[in-house]
Image (cartoon, helix red, strand yellow):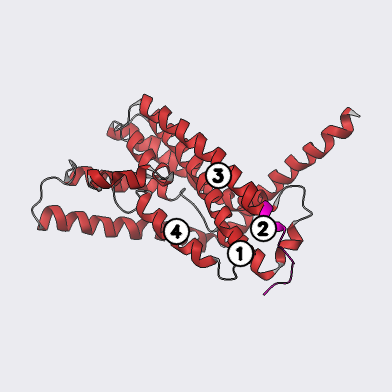
Amino acid sequence: MAERSLKPSWLRWVWRVAALKNGFKDATAYRIEFLFEVLGAAVVPAAIQWVLWYALFKVGGMNEVAGMTYTDMVQYTLVSLLFSQVRGGDHDFELSELIRSGQLSNYLLRPVGVVEFIYIRGVAPKLFIASICLVIGMVLGLFFGFDPMRMFGAMIMALVGNIIHYQIGAALASTGFYWEEAYSVLMVKNMIVSLLSGELIPLNIFPESLQWIWKSTPFYLYVFGPVQYALGRWTHAEFFMQMGIASLWLVAGWLLVKISWGLGMRRYLSLGG
């Protein structure tokens, strides 16, 4: 009896590992394309930010913006590259397309739920990128005086942010059960996240009266939070407090996914469109 009850759980873990391997192989099948995709996602935003900081400080003659100098801004931009590559992915768009096309039926009999399966496959390349960024960050930290262990903690926060990002996206993807053009909701979400995650600008640039906007979302945990801790601008106590907040968002995201997909599956007809 004991062996019979343990076997399904064991099989589910084997399936998860296989899905992780499959997702990594799928993402890196075209290695040059994968490399250019990663480099493009890193270089283009960094170049835009550098032009902005150069215009403000070198051309505009400003000395500080929100207490940050030109050096601080460039430092923030460079370190944020290590975490913005871990931030998210398009797994929620894949879920939305599965619902819209009716292909979701092919995933319903797998050993793990479809929401979890899509995430496991999609997170594989992100874990690979995160490990590379972590090594780069820890090595650079030794040369520039950053604490390598802070970089490790910051990367953990970024990975937790990746999970929260997917949970929110998966819950929004469930609108596909009700609306054929659900991808537009995900597009709006991505634009908001780009601004409020700290990927584009440091969030402390926001006026004091408006900082409640980003503080009331989990998005700052994706990029801004990890950068602040890695650069030593958050104390250890602040970091652990923020990780506690991230844990609450994880629980809330899990409940949101369970409820939204539970209600949505009651409407699913597998007709496609």
* Magenta region, residue range: 262-273
- Look at the magenta stretch and give its main secondary structure: loop
* Lower sequence index among marks 3 and 1: 1
Q: Please give the residue where the numbered disc 3 appears in the rendered image.
A: 253
> In the image, what residue type sits under mark 3?
Gly
Q: Which amino acid does label 1 sit on?
A: Gly
Look at the image and tell me whether residue 116 can be seen.
yes
Residue lying at 32% horizontally and 43% vertically, measured from the top left: 212
Assign a secondary structure to mark 2: helix
Q: Which numbered disc covers residue 190?
A: 4
Q: Which of marks 2 and 3 is nearer the N terminus?
A: 3
Which badge, 4 or 3, is on the more N-terminal residue?
Answer: 4
Disc 2 + disc 1, Cβ < 8 Å? yes
Q: CA gap, disc 4 to disc 3?
A: 17 Å
Q: In this image, 82 relative to 260: left or right?
A: left
Instruction: State how far apart marks 3 and 1 are (Cα).
Output: 18 Å
Residue 176 bears which disc, if any?
1
Residue 47 x, y percent position in the rendering = 29, 58
Please indicate, yes or no, whether residue 28 appears anywhere in the rendered image.
Answer: no
Mark positioned earlier in the residue sequence (2 or 1): 1
25 relative position to 129: left or right: right
Q: Quadrant of the N terminus?
A: top right
Foreground disc of the pair 2, 4: 2
